[in-house]
Image: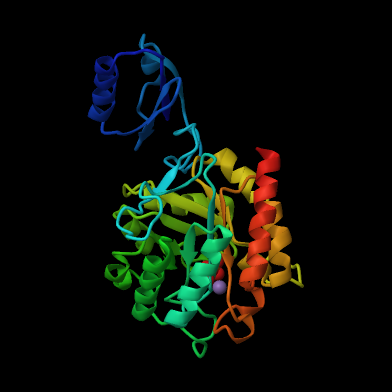
């Protein structure tokens, strides 16, 4: 249920209302907008008398929210959420105020599928930064379909990402597959929950107890509602720093690895206030399709992109076929920039 408070109501009267609602055993999510304050009521609202609340002189309107997702719902928070990835702890960071995503702030995450060596990750990090990336991606723990394939450098991979972060100032994004690894991610800037773990509810709940930005990727066969319910698992534990990611879903299309569901971007923006980014690399599985899909994502309002870049794709230990060479990534960045400017 949401309660819209009239403009210019004093803090004192607003707090009285909030205390009264909390007294009914409800959680109250407060969203202060430019023109009005929206109170999102969480919990069992079946016994709440909407007419009584609506009759209060400081209340503008009361609406029941029928969707099962509440905290990520745009009705609870009408303005876009802007998520800040802190950078104050990164010595080499150019901007110590953090990297912002959402509400017009664009994130370009780029890097290899997997961290393979110090040289590899540092060189790629420098190249993608020079092209305009503001976050460095790289897998340390890799979810592979075959147990015989490269599984990632694990803890060592995270250490190498930190070296690349210090060399370039770029915050790092890497995937957590298992709760028991959480202590290793203390110093990671954005924790990625991969497609295969989108409904690992124990993992989501535990990440909800941290204050880390979480990049939540859509599962291979999950609906948008399920994606939003997974975001809700994180947010209901107190962590509101969730970035949604469309990375392609399984369909019967046969020439691409997945099908990029681009309509997810405007639809998620309609349903939720959370930033939405697009992964054209895993969506297509084919390097030459990354540029057109990245451009299309920019055209439909994505808040960012996550793109796989490798200095030697043919010898990459994972996902070489979809990885761009740094010079091709540079061209993509320029095209995306032009599209964003044209739409601004
Ligand atoms: C990845 O980003 O390298 C990855 C494994 O992505 P996804 O979970 O979307 O397959
Ligand atoms: Mn990959």
Residue at 59% across, 78% down = 319
x, y percent for residue 4: 42, 21
Residue at 70% across, 62% down = 291
x, y percent for residue 115: 46, 77
Quadrant hosting residue 314 = bottom right
x, y percent for residue 244: 51, 53
Instruction: Identify whether 245 is placed above or below 116.
Output: above
- Looking at this view, is 212 or 55 the one in front? 212
Image quarter where the N terminus lies is: top left
User: On the rendering, which quadrant does ligand 2 occupy?
Assistant: bottom right
Residue at 58% across, 69% down = 308
Quadrant hosting residue 253 = bottom right
- Is residue 198 among the parts visible in the rendering? no
The answer to whether residue 97 is left or right of residue 127 is left
- Looking at this view, is 138 or 180 the one in front? 138
Image quarter where the C terminus lies is: top right
The answer to whether residue 332 is left or right of residue 237 is right
């Amino acid at each position: 249920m949401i309660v819209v408070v009239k403009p210019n109501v004093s803090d004192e009267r607003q707090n009285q209302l909030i205390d009264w609602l909390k007294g009914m055993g409800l959680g109250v999510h407060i969203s202060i907008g430019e023109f009005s304050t929206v109170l999102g009521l969480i919990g069992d609202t079946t016994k709440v008398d909407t007419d009584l609340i609506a009759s209060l002189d400081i209340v503008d309107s009361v609406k029941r929210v029928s969707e099962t997702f509440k905290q990520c719902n745009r009705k609870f928070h009408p303005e876009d959420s802007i998520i800040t990835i802190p950078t104050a702890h990164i010595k080499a960071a150019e901007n110590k105020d953090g990297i912002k995503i959402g509400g017009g702030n664009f994130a370009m995450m780029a890097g290899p599928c997997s961290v393979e060596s110090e040289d590899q990750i540092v060189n790629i990090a420098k190249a993608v930064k020079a092209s305009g990336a503001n976050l460095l991606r790289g897998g340390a723990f890799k979810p592979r379909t075959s147990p015989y394939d490269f599984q990632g450098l694990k803890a060592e991979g995270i250490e190498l990402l930190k070296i690349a972060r210090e060399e370039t100032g770029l915050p790092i994004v890497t995937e957590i597959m298992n709760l028991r690894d959480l202590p290793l991610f203390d110093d990671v800037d954005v924790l990625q929950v991969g497609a295969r773990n989108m409904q690992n509810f124990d993992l989501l709940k535990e990440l909800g107890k941290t204050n880390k930005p979480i990049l939540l990727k859509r599962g291979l066969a999950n609906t948008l509602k399920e994606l939003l319910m997974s975001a809700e698992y994180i947010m209901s534990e107190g962590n509101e720093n969730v970035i949604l990611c469309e990375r392609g879903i399984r369909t019967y299309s046969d020439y691409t690895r997945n099908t990029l569901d681009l309509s997810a971007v405007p639809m998620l923006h309609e349903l939720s206030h959370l930033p939405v980014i697009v992964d054209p690399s895993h969506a297509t599985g084919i390097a030459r399709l990354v540029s057109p899909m990245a451009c299309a994502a920019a055209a439909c309002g994505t808040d960012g992109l996550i793109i796989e870049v490798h200095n030697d794709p043919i010898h990459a230990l994972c996902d070489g076929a979809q990885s761009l060479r740094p010079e091709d990534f540079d061209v993509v960045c320029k095209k995306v920039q032009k599209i964003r400017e044209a739409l601004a």
